[in-house]
Image (cartoon, coloured by chain):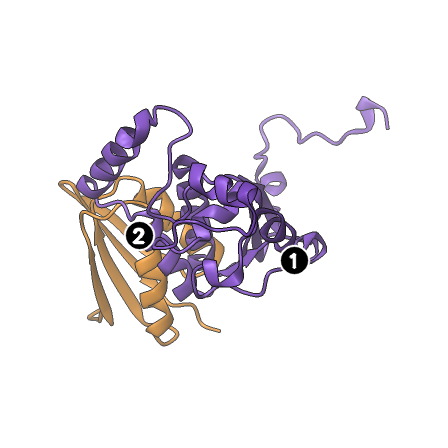
Chain colours: A orange, B purple
Amino acid sequence: MSITIAKSLDLKGLSCPLPIIKTAKAMKELAPGQLLEAFATDPGSVSDFKAWAQTTRNPLVESSQDGGVFHFVLKKKEI
Amino acid sequence: MSIDTIQKPPIGQPVEQISEKKPETAEKLVIFAWSGELDKVWPTLILATTGAAMGKETTVFFTFWGLFPLVKNQVRITGENWMQKMLSMMNRGGDEHLKLSKMNFAGAGPAMMNHLAKEHHVASPHELMEVAKEMGVHLIPCQMTMDMMGLKREDLIDGLEEPAGATKALADAQGAITLFI
């Protein structure tokens, strides 16, 4: 099964709170069930994405790291 | 209730069922922005924009020194009488003229701070103020302090809500996370 990413965000170089703000804005555009991926370099974004996903109830389906780049995949919640 | 009656999980049992009950998430964030200094206005705007990004109904109620960052950057002197004018001379308004609460060094401190922020791609207070408006954060100036300090609606930036009083601020704060910065 192939996974389709509906939107990809490059947040590399940005510091708190911009990665989350840009992600929140982009997530608004998605339809329920669609996936958004984001690449960030702010180490604080690891806990921020987790916390954002929990409080907004949009599941964080992936949180990984490749070198200094963090990769997140969020799924827009079903209403 | 005596200590003996408190239910403890038997030894060896996971305590999951206790921690499973998550605290209710507050749907609102209300910040009372009392300070006008760079190092306080900045976190205020970071928290406000983040609150909005988390889907919280977010309000910032600007009062006392906190009003001056709302003055338009190009407006220099505000106030009607000499005391109000003197106040604005000594304490220039605008989100691009904020001072540090310590290590201000006649403006050298904030200049260095802004330089560091640019280097680290941190959004400036001015940029965050714009983001806050865009995200629908309610920015409410305090009517009483505006009157007292001689700040008129036209001295303040666009995109603010109607000036209001303490009752409106406290009514908004019901059931919200509240911060006084």
Density class for disc 2 (Cα within 10 Å; few <14, some 14-19, many ≥20) is many
Disc 1 marks which amino acid? Asp
Mark identifier at residue A62? none
Residue at position x 43%, y 65% from top?
A: B158
Q: Nearer the viewer, mark 2 or mark 1?
A: 1
**In the picture provided, is B131 more to the left or to the right than B117?**
right
Residue at position x 55%, y 58% from top?
A: B140
The answer for how far apart the CA atoms under marks 2 and 1 are is 26 Å
Q: Chain of mark 2?
A: A
Splitting the image into 4 quarters, where does residue A21 fall? bottom left
Between B62 and A15, which is closer to the camera in this rendering? B62
**Spot occupied by residue B69 in the image (x, y as percentages of width and height):** 44, 48
Inspect this view and state whether residue B20 appears: no
Mark identifier at residue B172? 1
Disc 2 marks which amino acid? Leu
Inspect this view and state whether residue B84 appears: yes
The single residue placed furthest to the front in the displayed view is B82
Q: Secondary structure at mark 2?
A: helix
Q: Chain of mark 1?
A: B
**In the picture provided, is A53 more to the left or to the right than B84?**
left
Between B41 and A76, which is closer to the camera in this rendering? B41
**Spot occupied by residue A18 in the image (x, y as percentages of width and height):** 30, 52
Q: Which residue is mark 2?
A: A18
